[in-house]
Image (spheres, coloured by chain):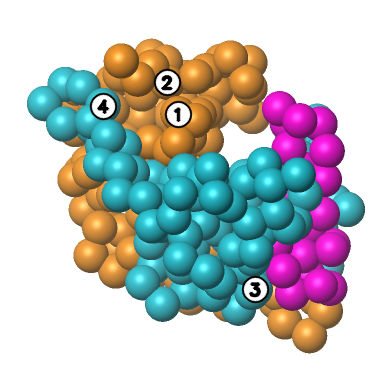
Chain colours: A orange, B cyan
Amino acid sequence: MIKIDFDKMGGLIPAVIQDYETGDVLMVAFMDEKTLNLTLKDGKTWFFSRTRNKYWMKGEESGNTQDVMEVLTDCDADTVVIKVKQNGPAACHTGNRSCFYVKWENGQWVEHSNPLFNPDDVYKKK
Amino acid sequence: MIKIDFDKMGGLIPAVIQDYETGDVLMVAFMDEKTLNLTLKDGKTWFFSRTRNKYWMKGEESGNTQDVMEVLTDCDADTVVIKVKQNGPAACHTGNRSCFYVKWENGQWVEHSNPLFNPDDVYKKK
């Protein structure tokens, strides 16, 4: 029986979130055993934030949740790829469709930012 | 100027390797600053192996190298997505095209293994 290996990285595994229609990688975040199980049961993506040291459901504040369409793990069961239907215009908190909008070009990182919402409207409403 | 953040994970970042044609995630591995720079300069993918504690170029033993087509980083510059042309039949050491051949189905992980080469033929030739 395959069991996810959370030991390699102190209880966390990387989770690659991929748009199930376009194949674009929308974001990469981390899951522990609890948030992986929540994701598998709930059908929405849950993560553990290393910087904020807390659990969070993607979209809990913005409304831009992700419906889980398919979950894959790899040959050594220490990473997951989750194909999702992205709700709302964008996955990234910057308003970009994908978090990966920075490209290596001619020896430097170049931002290709094209925000589909204004983060000030979506976050920090409290 | 954007600088990759290697500090969050003790000098390492996850690198998502994606087939530039199909969008399939072929593998996820880790890079430190040295192997990211090697990858950017060399045009082949280089990684740091956490289990073997060494640098390796994908395909150095099997010949199934990866040509770097595009390199992206994310909003907080702590992960890279690398789109590659996969040389040879497969990326995974098991002979599967992608390492992600294990799928969550009806409450369990199910292997969908379809090896395109025999690992015994490709590895441990020495």
Q: Position of residue A33 (x, y in %)?
A: 42, 15
At label 3, the amino acid type is Val
**Chain of the residue displaying label 2:** A
Q: Position of residue B109 (x, y in %)?
A: 26, 26
Q: Position of residue B73 (x, y in %)?
A: 63, 61
Secondary structure category for the residue under label 3: strand
The residue depicted at 71 percent of the width and 27 percent of the height is: B51
At label 4, the amino acid type is Trp
Name the residue beneath numbered marker 3: B68
Dot 3 or dot 4: first in sequence order is 3
Secondary structure category for the residue under label 2: loop
Name the residue beneath numbered marker 1: A77
Q: Same chain for labels 1 and 3? Say yes or no.
A: no
Check disc 3: other Cα within 10 Å, few if <14, some if 14-19, many if 20+: many
Q: Same chain for labels 2 and 3? Say yes or no.
A: no
Name the residue beneath numbered marker 4: B109
